[in-house]
Amino acid sequence: MNKRVLLIGLGLIGGSIAMAIKKEHSCTIIGHDISADHANLAKRLSIIDTICTDLQKEAEMADLIVLATPVEETERLLEWFSDFTIPPGALITDVGSTKSRIMEKASSIVDKGITFIGGHPMAGSHKSGPGSAKTHLFENAFYMITPGPETPDQRIEELKDWLKGTRAKFIVMDAEKHDLLTGVVSHFPHVVAASLVRQVEHYSHAHHQVNDLAAGGFKDITRIASSSPVMWKDIIKHNKENILTFIDEWIMEMECVKDLVKSGSDQGLLDYFSGAKQYRDALPIKAKGAITSFYDLYVDIIDDVGVISRVTSILAEKKISITNIRVIEAREDIYGVLRVSFQSEGDRQQAKESLENLQFTTYIAM
């Protein structure tokens, strides 16, 4: 029997999940979005098969329901769904960046015998909308799955099977642990990045040169501050307690740094920065999905006419395909760094050897 998937939210994430599901499963995908333009575009691109006209009717007929909506909208939908007659065999999941509150909100439908399993695909893009959706968006990315304590293992495996077309790396953990870990490595860093930007903005009013000087490494370390303010407002609200703990710990850390700066201790400062460098350099080089899933090679370049053309010509002569190329300014001892992306580790290694044979300095990670 042809199964039915109800997808609510037809943006980048929802559209990409639909494409991944259709790649592996014979099913009908019914799409719903508050934006008629998104819904119509998703239909024209064959991301979905049908545009939903009656949400309750489709929810009560679905085998799988995917809530690809902002976290607060997901909460509202789960509350609304509690009044629906959803079949016991149906499976409901979401894509939210926080999980504890959503799992709590889902308890009303779980109590009715409906299986809800939280989901969080940790991949994305600076682009949005169904027109940016890609089947491989989540390839090699971590896809967090947060079942309830009573969720049968076979339902978890069922969800993984539905999502196998993502080619993601599934990690199963409880909601509280998810929010703690994603809070410390994702949510809290966003708060720090935003605060750094606001501090520089304050100085820019009196010193206009700040904007020019901040165009290099500063933009790289604060890149995430350009993400959707509405989305991050909701995420921080949902992970409030963890974020407050991290802020308190950060203040204590900054007090320690302040004492080191005051003391002017050569050894103290050296140990502090050395410890940070040692831990950062030991972090795994993560293979990620979609635009950010490529294998990056960093090449030192001087400010000279034709230097970028020379690099690309060397790679072209070796028949090495480039997927992306960008000039960044992340280090102060050289004029610039060229970040060249490849589709495979083999291409990256061949490029590294070819460029170094012609006296270019390259790095796998920065």
Image (cartoon, rainbow, N blue to C red):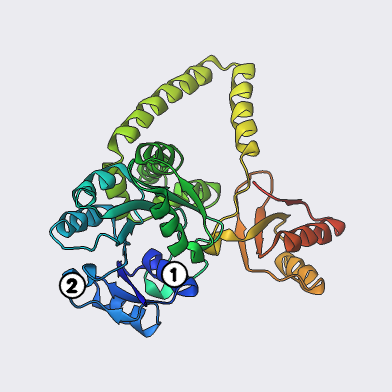
Distance from disc 2 to disc 1, alpha carbons, whole Å, reads 22 Å
Q: Which mark is residue 57?
A: 2
Q: Quick one: 245 or 18, which is closer to the camera?
A: 18
Task: Say above or below: 342 vs 233.
Answer: below
Judge whether residue 2 can be spotted in this image: yes
Indicate which disc, 2 or 1, sits on the residue closer to the N terminus.
Answer: 1
Verify CB contact (< 8 Å) between mark 2 and mark 1. no
Q: Position of residue 238 (x, y in %)?
A: 27, 43
Q: Position of residue 70 (x, y in %)?
A: 29, 57
Q: Quick one: 316 or 242, which is closer to the camera?
A: 242
In the image, taking residue 153 as reference, residue 6 lies left or right, namely: left
Which secondary structure, mark 1? helix
In the image, taking residue 240 as reference, residue 361 lies left or right, namely: right
Q: Quick one: 274 or 204, which is closer to the camera?
A: 274
Corner quadrant of residue 79: bottom left
Q: Which mark is residue 225?
A: none
In the image, taking residue 98 as reference, residue 121 lies left or right, namely: right
Task: Say above or below: 302 vs 135.
Answer: above
Which residue is drawn at the image coordinates 48% and 47% (left, top)? 171
Corner quadrant of residue 114: bottom left
